[in-house]
Image: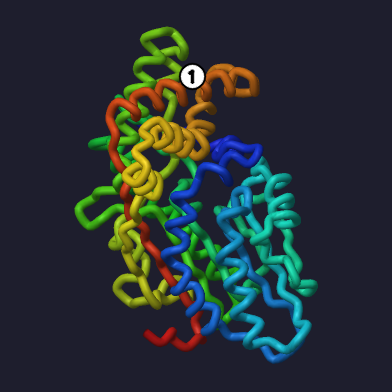
Amino acid sequence: MLTNIPVRDHGVMEGKGAYNRYAKLPAGGGALALPLWEKAVRSVEVEPDNQPIVIADYGSSQGKNSLAPMRLAIKTLRERLAPGRSISVFHIDQPSNDFNTLFEVLDTDPDSYTLDEPDVFPCAVGKSFYKKVFPQGHVHLGWCSYAAVWLSRIPAQISGHFIAHRSTGAEHAAFARQAAQDWEAFLSLRASELRSGGRLVVVLPALSDDGVSGFEGLMDQANTVLEEMVHEGAIGKDERERMVLGAYPRRRCDLLAPFQPRGQFCDLSVESCDLFPLEDSIWADYERDGDNEARATRQALFFRSIFVPSLALSLNEFHDAEQRRIFADRFENRLKRRLANQPAPLHSFVQSVVLAKRGSAPIDA
């Protein structure tokens, strides 16, 4: 069913630090791109004046998964900068993001990049990255990990499921068009914000060349849970039909499409585009300790912290925080039982793209 459902600017990730606690898989995906990020930091053009270096963290969520890349960037920059030169780090996310947890992490986490760095200044911007975030030519380095998988809007309802890659026909075509438009919009905005010689590294959950994400089994289990909840009257049929995730993993060819055939798009050029397999650390722990209940619990909490708030937006009483919590608890418990009965890993794929603004020298291989 084709429709036009705007993605509301709240509920994308579960608050009160839940995403920090349970979204370990995105952290693992981001870690795979850190060597590419370090090369990008070493290659970025830095002016010989004393103006602050600006790093943009597009889609920071609650901050925990941003600590390692920001710490690496600052350490690498310090090798190139004069002593005492300021570095500003901007964490960007939607206005309803749990920024309280983010600032608590920056202040108290033992891995915070602000420790022993008096000339590093963290800031936050509550704004969608599908809008202008910075003035033109303001950003030296951009990092975006897993956030660009989310679309700016949901273009269609999905018959019998809630994820785009289980849709067919006109529904699937609508999502493919939206994903292509959003990727070009994201790139054009970041190109405007980057300085000449700047670098942008984007890390995304990806599809393999065969169109596999690795999450199909988990998503199908979750879909069955929703059907059970409708059957028992926990949610209405109309609520279930409105439940659609605005997440769209892409293939390598989708990410490179805007750069064809000239090799550039909005003054950006691709320095690398790499697909990595990502092993499920939860499954590795299960194989080591055999604790099936712990595995099922962690996989269910992973799904809840990332996806359940978006599903809950379709509840008739989504403004009621208690109703959203009740829905999330019921969903989590049912999903955990299903996952416990059918153990399976969440091995997935990660795509990392390194982009350079025109005027910069290429990164050495």
Q: Which residue is mark 1?
A: 330
Q: Where in the figure is residue 211, as x and y percent of width and height?
A: 24, 50
Is residue 3 something that shows in the picture?
no
Side of 107 relative to 23 (left or right):
right
Question: Going 49% across and 72% down the picture, which residue do you hit?
Answer: 37
**Dot 1 alpha-carbon crowd within 10 angstroms: few under 14, some 14 to 19, many 20 or more:** few
Examine the rendered structure and indicate whether residue 338 appears above or below residue 56.
above
Regarding mark 1 in the picture, which secondary structure is present there?
helix
Examine the rendered structure and indicate whether residue 143 appears above or below residue 223.
below
Residue placed farthest to the bottom in the image?
48
Q: Quadrant of residue 54?
A: bottom right
Side of 209 relative to 151 (left or right):
left
Residue placed farthest to the front in the image?
289
Mark 1 residue type: Arg
Question: Going 30% across and 53% down the picture, which residue do you hit?
Answer: 207
Q: Where in the figure is residue 306, as x and y percent of width and height?
A: 50, 39
Q: Quadrant of the C terminus?
A: bottom left
Residue placed farthest to the left in the image?
210
